[in-house]
Amino acid sequence: MRLHRNLCFATVDGLLLIFNEGMYADKVVQQLLKRDKRWGSRDRGFVAETTYDIVRWKRLYAEIADVKEPFSRDDVWRMFAVWATLRGIKLPDWKYFEGTPLRKIKGRFDELSKVRKIKESIPDWMDELIVSELGEAVWNKEATALNEQADVILRTNTLKTTKEKLQTELFDLDVETESIEGYPDALKLKERSNVFTTNAFQNGWFEVQDASSQLVAEFLEVKPGMKVVDTCAGAGGKTLHMAALMENKGQIIAMDIYENKLKELKRRAKRAGAHNIEFRVIDSTKPIKKLHDKADRVLIDAPCSGLGVLRRNPDAKWKLRPEFIEKIKVTQQEILEQYSRMVKPGGKLVYATCSILPSENENQVKTFLESNKEFTFIKDKKVLSHKSGFDGFYMALLERK
């Protein structure tokens, strides 16, 4: 691979914004990709993937390059040189790479790879917390899996097409996909590709949604004709999946505290042809009280640490703080207490997170059930990346007596 100056400059500029200004990697990458209209898909792919790669391995590369935060521009170039050297990419004779100690980089990598938190590029506190909850053996495997680049998974929108038709349509556009056993509507891209520009996407034939996330709507056992409440709907990947499983029959009430997220869901629902969704902003306790004892099914896709989705959000490793996790656990319990009241007798509730921590998952369900004798535990499912190859997730199904 030959390095191109303008692509490398863009990457370094982006990394400075992410590391020093605290900007989100996905937003920065979106901006960078608009920088030069002449860039082809390979150029844009290089900028996006290299940026994410260096964010993912920030601690390891900084230790090898012997640089400390806040990083100067020269520091980031040194980390870039480490990234390239470890990938066997020949460094051009640019001034930024003068005096790069190639042999020393490889030696330092071998030496530092003996320490898990450096090898897997994880903050000390996070490594300690997850070991205390999952144990050394599981965390060793999970840490490695969470550093792998996430596959692009599509969910077929069965309101508009079938998986076979979608697969054929994409194949005709040179986008090859494969089915995943145990995930009825999922297709995995064999190679990364910008699927958002396809007619199939514009016409609402699919959404991009990780395979683990696709398990949640089915876990809730929704059926056509039911009244279903999605309490933390966000931009609505799971809401749209439920609409498809319900064949547009019945009613889904999509709720969120953020109105802008519901606006995005409204736009997506229109494209998907999902007509059975109502949108309600939770701006007080009123919208919740109005639905007490009314819903056949309630989904609580709770706010969480997001430790199960580090593959796609590697900058979360550096933005998360232990105090945030403690705070979010309190919020999770409050949400469970309040939103569970919408379930009618005989109805069911799913509590889900994209976390791998038992303290955010089964422990929260246990605490809730101890204080709410009206609910009984039916089943739960823990998904770990090193076993599934997909995001870390948790879901528990409860029934109201």
Image (cartoon, rainbow, N blue to C red):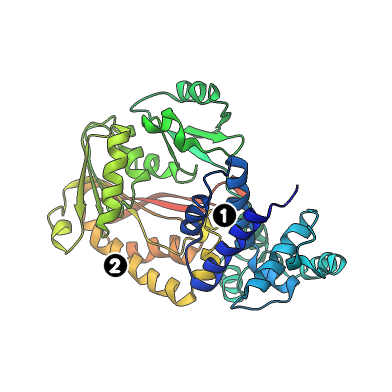
Type of amino acid under label 1: Arg
Q: Residue furthest right?
A: 103
Residue 124, image quadrant: bottom right
Give the total number of marks visible in the rendering. Answer: 2
Task: Identify which residue is drawn at 23% across, 62% down.
Answer: 338
| Mark whose residue sits in front, 1 or 2 | 1
The answer to whether residue 230 of the structure is visible from this angle is no
69 and 155: which is toward the camera: 69
Residue 99, given in percent of the width and then of the height, sits at 82, 70
Left or right: 307 in relation to 143: left
Q: In this rendering, does residue 109 appear at all? A: yes
Q: Secondary structure at mark 2?
A: helix
Where is 267 relative to 315, above or below? above
Which residue is drawn at the image coordinates 50% and 70% (left, top)?
A: 319
- Residue 299: numbered disc: none
Q: Residues within 10 Å of mark 1 (few under 14, many from 20)?
A: many
List the residue tagged with mark 2. 334
Residue 197, image quadrant = top left
Q: Amino acid at mark 2?
A: Glu
Disc 1 from disc 2: Cα separation: 29 Å
- When the figure is inspected, residue 6 is found, relative to residue 165, above or below; the finding is below
Say whether residue 346 is left or right of residue 313: left
Left or right: 63 with respect to 386?
right
Q: Earlier in the sequence, mark 1 or mark 2?
A: 1
Q: Is residue 119 left or right of residue 177?
A: right
Q: Nearer the viewer, residue 52 or 148?
A: 52
Q: What's the mark number on residue 311?
A: 1
Image x and y of residue 30, in percent:
48, 53
Residue 252, horizontal then vertical, whole percent: 23, 42
Location of residue 337 by image quarter: bottom left
